[in-house]
Image (cartoon, rainbow, N blue to C red):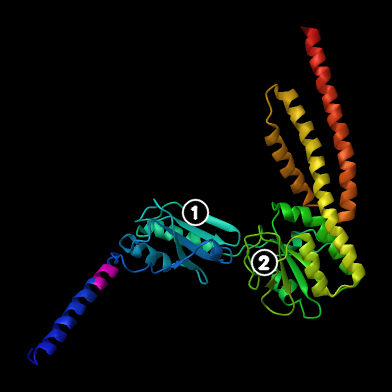
């Protein structure tokens, strides 16, 4: 039988072991040498979380091993985070475990630091200043934007609260389109949205459509974060908008008919417009083709060198899209303009071919 004194002795030994273990853990934590069995003391961010996250600094750790976690560096990083900015981590194998890469994200902007030593005073102060500047909100100057009475009003980061949040009511909601200049679907739908907006004005609907360029403006307070465009957000008197899952023309019309309580006549007109979006795609493609052909022939004549038609087509397409995004026409007008442009481009291409043929004949005669 064990003596009655053995139990207290075991308690003392157990307490001593815990104290020693606790001291070791504390020392390891303060020295940045953390136990392998514990998790990383940062929020992990994946693609799903990133798609709805703004104002974040992402540390690219080399692994999930706690003994490789750069605690001191991360603590220094946390000490200079601007208000409202959080730090997360993701794992990128091969990253420097002592001075891990860091990526800053705000709105659609990002800034990458391949390696930074925050224990170095000069690097620490420079990074602190650059980070404060980066997380300062970016906004277009609303006065510089070209507004048109029949197209959706353009809003900015600075004008968002007055033009959207406070202007929207349950009886007069606002549908905000988040777009990017280089987004193909945004480009394709541009005149379609203009026609929808014009129709809402004609029938005196209280529903209004507005636009926010999220390439040129950070996400304002009350605007949901999105990495995909176009995105439509409904504001109806609440400070936070409701993001629609609908973004394709036909789905957008179905949702708008429901929200705006449109009659069958308006619904039929808007559904007809969705068919015309496909027609615009086809016509724009033909126009870009003829322009590309003319450009490729001209470059061949001028440079006397082989021309990569795919590269020419890509350049022409980007240029034409950029020009189109500056237009204010509606879909009906745009289709007619594209039809005229195709005829003109075909004629120009034939003229260029004739010039090239004449050049070839002239060169042969000289021989």
Q: What percent of the width, then of the height, locates residue 41?
A: 39, 69
Identify the image quadrant of residue 277: bottom right
Is residue 40 rendered to the left or right of residue 268?
left
**Pointer 2 local density, CA inside 10 Å: few below 14, some 14–19, many at least 20:** many
Identify the image quadrant of residue 8: bottom left
Q: Nearer the viewer, residue 276 or 358?
A: 276
In the image, which residues are magenta?
25-30
Is residue 305 rendered to the left or right of residue 195?
left
Examine the rendering and report whether any part of residue 339 can be seen.
yes
Marks 1 and 2 sit apart, C-alpha to C-alpha, by 24 Å
The majority secondary structure of the magenta stretch comes to helix
- In this view, the residue farthest toward the bottom is 4
Q: What percent of the width, then of the height, locates residue 127?
A: 45, 59
Q: Which residue is mark 1?
A: 112
Is residue 262 rendered to the left or right of residue 105?
right
Q: What percent of the width, then of the height, locates residue 107?
A: 60, 62
Residue drawn at 81 percent across, 77 percent down: 172
The quarter of the picture where the C terminus appears is top right
Q: Which residue is mark 2?
A: 157
Examine the rendering and report whether any part of residue 207 can be seen.
no
Element carrying mark 1: strand
Element carrying mark 2: loop
Residue drawn at 84 percent across, 65 percent down: 197
Q: Nearer the viewer, residue 279 or 189?
A: 279
Residue drawn at 74 percent across, 42 percent down: 317
Q: Is residue 12 above or below residue 219?
A: below
Residue drawn at 75 percent across, 23 percent down: 301
Q: Residue 339 magenta-drawn? A: no
Badge 1 or badge 2: first in the primary sequence: 1
**Pointer 1 local density, CA inside 10 Å: few below 14, some 14–19, many at least 20:** few
């Amino acid at each position: 039988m064990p003596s009655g004194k053995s139990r207290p002795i075991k308690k003392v030994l157990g307490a001593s072991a815990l104290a020693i273990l606790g001291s070791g853990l504390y020392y390891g934590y303060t020295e940045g040498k953390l136990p392998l069995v514990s998790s990383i003391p940062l929020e992990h961010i994946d693609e799903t979380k990133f798609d709805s996250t703004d104002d974040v600094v992402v540390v690219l750790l080399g692994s999930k091993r706690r003994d490789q976690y750069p605690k001191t560096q991360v603590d220094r990083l946390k000490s200079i985070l601007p208000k409202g900015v959080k730090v997360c981590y993701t794992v990128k194998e091969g990253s420097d475990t002592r001075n891990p890469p860091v990526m800053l994200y705000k709105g659609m902007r990002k800034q990458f630091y391949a390696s930074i030593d925050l224990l170095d005073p000069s690097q620490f102060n420079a990074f602190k200043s650059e980070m404060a500047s980066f997380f300062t909100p970016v906004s277009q100057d609303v006065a510089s934007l070209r507004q048109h009475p029949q197209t959706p009003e353009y809003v900015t980061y600075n004008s968002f609260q007055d033009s959207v949040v406070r202007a929207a009511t349950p009886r007069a909601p606002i549908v905000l389109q988040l777009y990017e200049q280089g987004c193909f679907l945004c480009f394709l739908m541009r005149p379609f949205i203009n026609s929808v907006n014009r129709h809402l004005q004609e029938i005196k609907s209280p529903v209004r459509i507005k636009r926010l360029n999220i390439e040129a403006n950070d996400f304002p307070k009350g605007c949901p974060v999105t990495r995909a465009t176009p995105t439509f957000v409904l504001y109806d008197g609440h400070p936070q908008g409701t993001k629609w899952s609908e973004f394709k023309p036909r789905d957008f019309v179905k949702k708008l008919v429901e929200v705006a309580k449109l009659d069958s006549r308006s619904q039929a007109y808007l559904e007809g417009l969705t068919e015309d979006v496909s027609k615009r795609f086809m016509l724009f493609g033909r126009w870009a083709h003829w322009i590309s052909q003319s450009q490729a022939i001209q470059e061949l004549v001028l440079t006397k060198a082989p021309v990569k038609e795919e590269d020419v087509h890509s350049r022409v397409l980007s240029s034409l899209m950029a020009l189109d995004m500056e237009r204010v026409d509606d879909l009906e007008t745009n289709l007619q303009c594209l039809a005229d442009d195709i005829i003109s481009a075909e004629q120009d291409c034939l003229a260029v071919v004739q010039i090239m043929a004449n050049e070839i004949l002239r060169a042969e005669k000289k021989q």
